[in-house]
Amino acid sequence: MDAIILQILNGLDKGSAYALIALGLTLIFGTLGVVNFAHGALFMIGAFCSVTLAKLLNLSFETVDPTQKDFLGNPLKVKTPYIESWFGPEVGATIIDWSVPLAILFAIPIMLVVGYVMERGLIKHFYKRPHADQILVTFGLAIVLQEIIKFYFGANPIQTPAPDALSGVASVGGAVGLNIAYPIWRLCYIAFSLLLIGGAFAFLQFTTFGMVVRAGMADRETVQLLGIDIDRRFTIMFGLAAAIAGLAGVMYGPINAPNYHMGMDFLVLSFVVVVVGGMGSLPGAVLAGFLLGILEAFASTTWATTTIPGINQIIIYLVAIIVLLTRPRGLMGKKGVMED
Amino acid sequence: MTKTTMSRRGVLKTGAIAGAGLALPTYLSAASHAGFTNAPQGDTVTLGFNVPQSGPYADEGADELRAYELAVEHLNGEGDGGMLNTFSSKALEGNGILGKKVEYVTGDTQTKSDAARASAKSMIEKDGAVMITGGSSSGVAIAVQGLCQEAGVIFMAGLTHSNDTTGKDKKANGFRHFFNGYMSGAALAPVLESQYGSDRKAYHLTADYTWGWTQQESIAAATEALGWETVNNVLTPLAQTDFSSYIAPVLNSGADVLVLNHYGGNMVNSLTNAVQFGLREKMIDGKQFEIVVPLFSRLMARGAGENIKGILGSTNWHWSLQDEGSKAFVQSFGTKYGFPPSQAAHTCYVQTLLYADAVARAGSFNPCAVVEALEGFEFDGLGNGPTLYRAEDHQCFKDVLVVRGKENPTSEFDLLEVVEVTPRAQVEYAPDHPMFAGGTLGECNPGA
Amino acid sequence: MFGLTKKDLSLLGIVAILTMAAPFILNPFPTESAMAQFNAGYPDLMQKFVIFGIFAIGFNILFGLTGYLSFGHAAFLGVGSYSCVWMFKLLGYNVLPGIALSIVVSGLFALLIGVITLRRSGIYFSILTLAFAQMSFALAYSVLSNPKFNLTNGETGLQVYADDPQWFHSANLPDLPHLFGLSMRATHRMTLGGWEFQFNAGYYMCAIIMLVCFYLAIRIFRSPFGLMLRAVKSNQQRMNYTGLNSRPYTLAAFVISGMYAGLAGGLLSAVDPLAGAERMQWTASGEVVLMTILGGAGTLIGPVLGAGLIKYFENIFSKINESVLHSWFGFLPDGLEDFVITIVYPFVGKGWHLTLGLIFMLVVIFLPGGLIEGGQRIGRLFRGKKASKAGKSATTEPAE
């Protein structure tokens, strides 16, 4: 029983990342009708926002300590972060320790701007072009973005650890007689994703802005005829989708150290998630994200891999193939979307 | 090499230009009069440095390239001479190799066999490289080694840890200075016993490809000989980034040691995940739970950050060693680049020197002469103590370092501390050891 | 002649002359000159040009004509490579059985995958093909290389070992792939002044096969079958409403392009007998998409140009390292030299992916018809409006 719940948690955890990326992809597709292959890169840029913030906080001045030697036998240069010298070592160290949660605030404006620039500078010109062209140009953009990150940050992963207070293990389900230890940060990640997803849905459901956007998704022309500047709102939605992907990336950093190709790693799977959920369906994307995450977790258990060798490597694709062949529009897809 | 047959006439007929080209079919024959592929012309000799410059191992590749540039400098008599001064063989005089100035070309392996072979071929076919070296993974090393055997040039392997490189896939033209999975197991086992006792249950997570399998086999054999029990071995996909589903079952398996047969990004992520799940704080039947990473690399350790602290593993070389050779190398590398070299840089630097020295001693660039000079060569002063290039499989035998992630690093480079230097005698094995059986060196191939 | 119109025949003729004279054309710089870095006329790269040319021609038959964007074509390349090496292992090093088997096996594999994936179109088709290719890659990399059932030899790559049966191998044959005794590596070097030209048997075999493939592609493009495929691209629904079932046509196109890919894979093994699983990875599928788009999807010659360009980047640009840059810009004053190198450095050597990505984006944004369209636009600029019509139809227009 414990093992099953543990794998469900693992699945939810992985599914959170899939769901957040897929949600953004679907938002962009649903509003602008653009298939964005650079969405994985946005996830990666988010993670590197937190790397950058950690670097900024760690900006240091050097003092020479003659009592210690460096590896060449010269006097050691000791680095002290400015933050620590401004706020005192205690407060400074705490600020640095909490750099990942701080990076959330740091990343939101950056991601909104990145999304806005991307939409106005590039994607805008591709509304009328075929989907294949959109895929290709954003694919090229993804390569360029990831190479730029590699140029500045190197190819090796860079750790962005969670704050000490959140990096331990919590016991889950003690009240119902279960004994499960699960990393606190991963629980935070699940909770954070649920909040973000809930927030996005609430925003679309209960605000005027969201209502207009939904109306625009359903019938763009009529909304425009009513004199509403739907394009501007859709651009903002693109920024929001970028921010969601970016925040997913920031929060993912402590789980696995960010590296330049993490976007591509997630991109392919997120696309499978979107398609399984049904193109254009927001609940479908979220549902499929969590579902595939959990399936992947269970396929990785020893029991599954001994029954069918290699199942852990192909399960997602296998499910995608079965779903697409039995339910052509995905789990919750609507008629007439992407069927030209 | 090529036989004249009926069919060639057919080919001759097919196209006039093709026919003209084939009238004198020779096999990679830049200078067939010299009797071997790419005999150096004029007063220079070209070496090919084939390292990963894109893809996940690009940082290792960059460090290897730095080491090669340093080695070329030293061979040409520039800089402070580095390990040339401590090398036991004095055949090299700092005037290039055999009086020819050393030049080099670089290429990108992308850590893919195809790209690595394409890059090596362009060095051989276009740039006239007489030796190829480098690489940061075993698949690539084996692929390029096979190519060099066919083309008739020498291959000096870079970082490759699979038993197969000098086992099942060994080749007469290929040489490996780096250690291998078997040696990791043999060196780690006694330390594991003294640190963790002989009554342990090990759970293996293994990267699901050739290198992972050979290392897992080696470590399991070495630890089982101590009396450890191997509870389970789970294969993880290479592309895996989140290992939580593989780590979670470890908790309830009854195992009290987790062995991570991972390298690169896999290692960073699996170790990070294992620490997240609190494995290191766990007590199983009164024993502290431990994690072992058999193949350590400082560059990777940096990626793993805090998680590496206190974890045992093995490594080929570490910059903190205090022998004269290591000190000289760290001094000249550190002065030039401002940070200490990695083990990948070390093995590549040494391989270049060893090749140059073998040419100098043989008095010829002919691959067969070089093979003869390297086979059974005993040397010292290159940072690993007395070392032997064994003639039977072209594997270097030397001391192996057992290291541990440092608890209180003084700098961003000071991540590992040497726990023990396992003497060479302890990691030696017979050339026909079952883990290495199946391949033959074959004859050295000078090409042409 | 050959059932071609005059224009197609002259196109075929130009391609034939270009491929046959490639060793000269690709080596414009003397060996000792500083520009020799940019020479591409060595056997390995020339072989890659024509082999990936075949791959791209085949991909174009599917994507350029029907508009079905497959993100899994590398799977067929990989299957072809493996089949060919298996023939080497079992029968011996003669390349013909290997190449034949690689076409057959990849054709069957394409039939199987095509029957399933072609039930959907658009992005669903792309994702389905991607899923199949990724599954093939994952299985080839690990599961199918386990010691009990080693079909692919995993990470190391499938290769011929001394203890393989090689039933038809005899001592007087080369120990490398050969065509009835003519080694694929046989190279004749011709020195003319400062120049050196290499004529390689493997290259000429691949080049001739590519010409045959190119000829077949022209025939397909010009046939009623090709017209039908274009109809699928322009409006499949209307086609279906007229009572035509388009599935058999798309399936045929899919299988043909799969066989082209398999042939390319077989040739890769024939010139270099090692087949690795990473040939099947989705990035490899992405590469052939890049090639086709860069050159010009739907045109006959475009994909071949695109393949050449990408392989040139991969092999030539990636070898420009910092010391090469210093030797180029050494004539500049120190400060300026460093400045120029800082600007150029991110784009060459290990940064070649970045340059490729940028060029690709620029092409998709400004030249949806690929380099061919670029060439046509330049041609129109020079020749004025009148000549442009002739120029347009000499190379086929994108089939839209």
Image (cartoon, coloured by chain):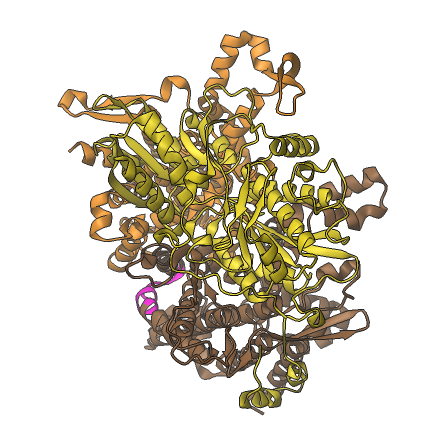
Chain colours: A orange, B yellow, C brown
Q: Let me know if residue A16 is in the magenta part.
A: no
Q: Let me know if residue C118 is in the magenta part.
A: yes
Q: Quadrant of residue B121?
A: bottom right
Please tell me which residue lies in front, C385 or B193.
Answer: B193
For the point 69% across and 37% down, the residue is: B85
Q: Is residue B293 above or below residue A31?
A: above
What range is drawn magenta here? C113-122
Q: Position of residue A73 (x, y in %)?
A: 65, 21
Q: Position of residue C384 (x, y in %)?
A: 75, 72
Q: Position of residue C235 (x, y in %)?
A: 42, 69
Please tell me which residue lies in front, A335 or C206.
Answer: C206
Please tell me which residue lies in front, A318 or B354.
Answer: B354
Q: Quadrant of residue B80?
A: top right
Please tell me which residue lies in front, B392 or C2.
Answer: B392
Residue C250 seen anywhere in this rendered image of the structure: no
Residue C40 seen anywhere in this rendered image of the structure: yes
Q: Is residue C62 above or below residue A181?
A: below
Q: Is residue C128 above or below residue B414?
A: below
**In this image, B186 relative to B388: left or right?**
left
For the point 50% across and 69% down, the residue is: C268
How many numbered marks, from 0 up?
0
**In this image, C189 relative to C247: left or right?**
right
For the point 20% across and 24% down, the residue is: B285
Q: Residue furthest left?
A: A177
Q: Quadrant of the N terminus of chain C?
A: bottom right
Magenta region, mostly helix, strand or loop? Answer: helix
Q: Is residue C252 above or below residue A320?
A: below
Q: Position of residue A68 (x, y in %)?
A: 61, 15
